[in-house]
Image: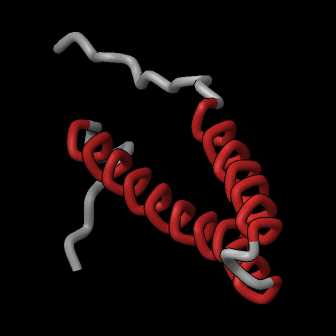
Amino acid sequence: MAEQTPIIVTDNSLEGQIGTLARYLVAAGGAFALGKGWIDDATLQALTALVTVAAPMAYGIWKTYTAKQKLIQTAQFAPNDIAQVVHK
């Protein structure tokens, strides 16, 4: 029987921390720009909504796609009675 490589799962939480940092930077930068008169309140609200709603949705879609690709790669190497890749 061939030697099997274990599935490695990372416990890295850096991705979530980067998202939080981005939200804080937009809030701080937006408040600064608003105070300087470079943007108005509606623009700041739009930017905040973009970062807090649209960006996490896009990130979630990308993470779902990459997780699916990893699952497909793993299933290709598993015995057929454990996992199978069905091409549709």
Residue 65 pos. (x, y %): 40, 62
Count the marks: how many? 0
Q: Residue 76's quadrant in the figure?
A: top left
Q: Residue at x 58, y 39 (%)?
A: 15
Looking at the image, which residue sits at the far front?
36
Where is residue 83? Give x, y as percent: 35, 48
Residue located 77% across and 53% down the image: 28
Residue 4 coordinates in the image, percent (x, y): 28, 16
Q: Residue at x 30, y 16 (%)?
A: 5
Left or right of 52? Residue 64 is left
By what rule are the colours in the image chosen? Answer: secondary structure
Q: Quadrant of residue 44?
A: bottom right
* Extreme residue in the bottom direction: 42
Looking at the picture, does residue 75 appear above or below residue 42?
above
Viewed as shown, does residue 4 lie left or right of 55? left
Q: Depth check: give the residue in front, 85 or 81.
A: 85
Question: From the viewer's perspective, is residue 59 above or below residue 77?
Answer: below
Q: Quadrant of the C terminus?
A: bottom left
**In front here: 70 or 80?**
70
Quadrant (top left, top right, bottom left, bottom right) of the N terminus: top left
**Residue 51 higher or lower than 16, as above or below:** below
Nearest the viewer among 13 and 87 is 13
The spot of residue 85 in percent (x, y) is 26, 59
The image quadrant of residue 86 is bottom left
- Residue 23 shown left or right of residue 62 in the figure: right
User: Image point 28% across, 37% down: which residue?
Assistant: 78
